[in-house]
Image (cartoon, grey):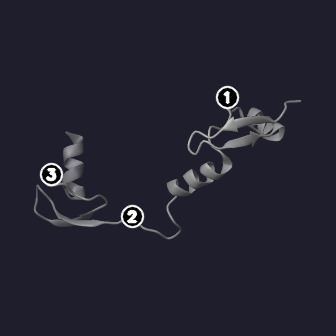
């Protein structure tokens, strides 16, 4: 049976134990590498990648650069790039 290993977190630099049970779990799942983050940093990273419950993506009002129609886009538009409504964007994508 594997022995517990002490690893160093790549984010915070803290040492953490990679237990024999966790090693077995990783092996059963086919994971080839041990964790590189401590449990706290893993949890923090997971939480930051998951949108908050009920949170919606902010939308920004714009005027389509091609047809002039008002629309909303899910990104903050830059002045140096054209922004299209859904219909005009689809046309440009097919080209």
Determine the residue positioned at 13% across, 50% down: 80
Look at mark 3 in the image and give the residue it sits on: 82
**Which residue is outermost to the bottom?**
54
Check disc 2: other Cα within 10 Å, few if <14, some if 14-19, many if 20+.
few
Residue at image mark 2: 57
Kindly report the distance in space between the C-alpha atoms of the residues bearing marks 3 and 2.
21 Å
Image: 32 above or below 46:
above
Q: Position of residue 30 (x, y in %)?
A: 71, 32
Q: In the structure shown, which secondary structural element does the residue marked by tag 3 occupy?
A: loop
Q: Which residue is mark 1?
A: 32
Q: Is residue 23 above or below residue 92?
A: above
Of the pair 18 and 81, the residue shown nearer to us: 18
Q: Quadrant of the N terminus?
A: top right
- Name the secondary structure under disc 2: loop
**What residue is rendered at 20% in x and 48% in y?**
91
User: Between residues 7 and 33, which one lies in front from this camera angle?
Assistant: 7
- The image position of residue 22, as x and y in percent, is 78, 40
- Find the distance from the CA under tag 2 to the CA under tag 1: 35 Å
Q: Nearer the viewer, residue 66 or 41?
A: 41
Looking at marks 3 and 2 on the same chain, the residue that comes earlier in the sequence is marked by 2
Q: Counting other residues with Cα less than 10 Å from the Cα at mark 1, is it few (<14), some (14-19), or many (20 or more)? A: few
């Amino acid at each position: 049976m594997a022995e517990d290993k002490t690893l160093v977190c790549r984010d915070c630099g803290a040492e953490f134990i990679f237990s024999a049970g966790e090693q077995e779990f990783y092996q059963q799942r086919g994971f080839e590498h041990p964790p590189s983050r401590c449990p706290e940093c893993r949890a923090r990273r997971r939480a930051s990648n998951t949108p908050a419950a009920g949170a919606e993506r902010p939308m920004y009002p714009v005027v389509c650069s091609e047809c002039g129609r008002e629309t909303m886009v899910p990104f903050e538009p830059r002045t140096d790039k054209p922004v299209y409504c859904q219909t005009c964007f689809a046309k440009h994508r097919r080209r």
